[in-house]
Amino acid sequence: MSAQDTHGSASAEVAARVERRWATIAVIIIVVMAGLAAFAGIHRATMPQPRVETIDPSRIHLSGEFVESNLGSVLEASGAVTVRAIGQQYSFTPACILVPADTPITLRATSADVVHGILIQGTNVNTMLVPGYISEQLMRFTRTGDYLMPCQEFCSFGHEGMWGKVKVIDKTEFANRAKGGGRLSCVGQ
Ligand SMILES: [Cu+2]
């Protein structure tokens, strides 16, 4: 074996070892990323809309969850609050959403006509309202006060006038108002 050959096979061995090492690292990276994607997809809170709920947009005013008398905030037996709202050209119903502070809140909303969006300023609440689908978003407010809620999807000529409001009040005050049952909102207040 000449010196040249020995040198050649030694460097080929080094190359093969380096290549194996990088292949192992690449496989580890892929496995970790697949694991993270699976975790994010399976763990409900980390991904938008992991579940799909559909609804007939032409019938939401007539029956079911989004009839007018069922819109607004309701205090559940568990102490959590559910808010139901709809967006339509060019307003939200209810136009003023009343919720308590320091309480887990589930917002359930849909659109009666075209695509709208709910964005609560100063928070990370931001969801699209797509006709035919129910959008659900979990939220919690630590501070009381008023938050603006503009429609964040261009929905035709009246879009810029489509504003709602969220009023966060003290937990006890909300509980008092909820005593009478029914659906709460702050429209006209
Ligand atoms: Cu809109």
Image (cartoon, rainbow, N blue to C red):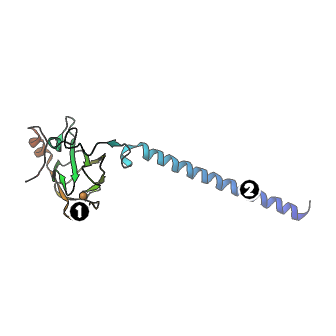
Residue projecting furthest to the right: 1
Give 68 or 135, whichever is nearer the viewer. 68
Helix, strand or loop status at disc 2: helix
Horizontal side, residue 185 vs residue 152: left or right: left
Residue topped by disc 1: 159
Ranked by sequence position, the earlier of labels 1 and 2 is 2
In the drawing, what numbered circle is on residue 16?
2
Residue projecting furthest to the top: 77
Q: State the residue at coordinates (86%, 60%).
A: 6
Helix, strand or loop status at disc 1: helix
Q: Quadrant location of residue 4?
A: bottom right
Horizontal side, residue 3 vs residue 152: left or right: right
Horizontal side, residue 153 vs residue 5: left or right: left
- Decide if ligand 1 comes within 8 Å of the CB at mark 1: yes
Q: Quadrant location of residue 8?
A: bottom right
Task: Find residue 13 and report its horizontal and vertical position in percent.
Answer: 77, 56
Task: Find residue 120 and report its horizontal and vertical position in percent.
Answer: 24, 57
- Decide if ligand 1 comes within 8 Å of the CB at mark 2: no
Amino acid type indicated by mark 1: His
Task: Find residue 175 and report its horizontal and vertical position in percent.
Answer: 12, 41
Ligand 1 occupies quarter: bottom left
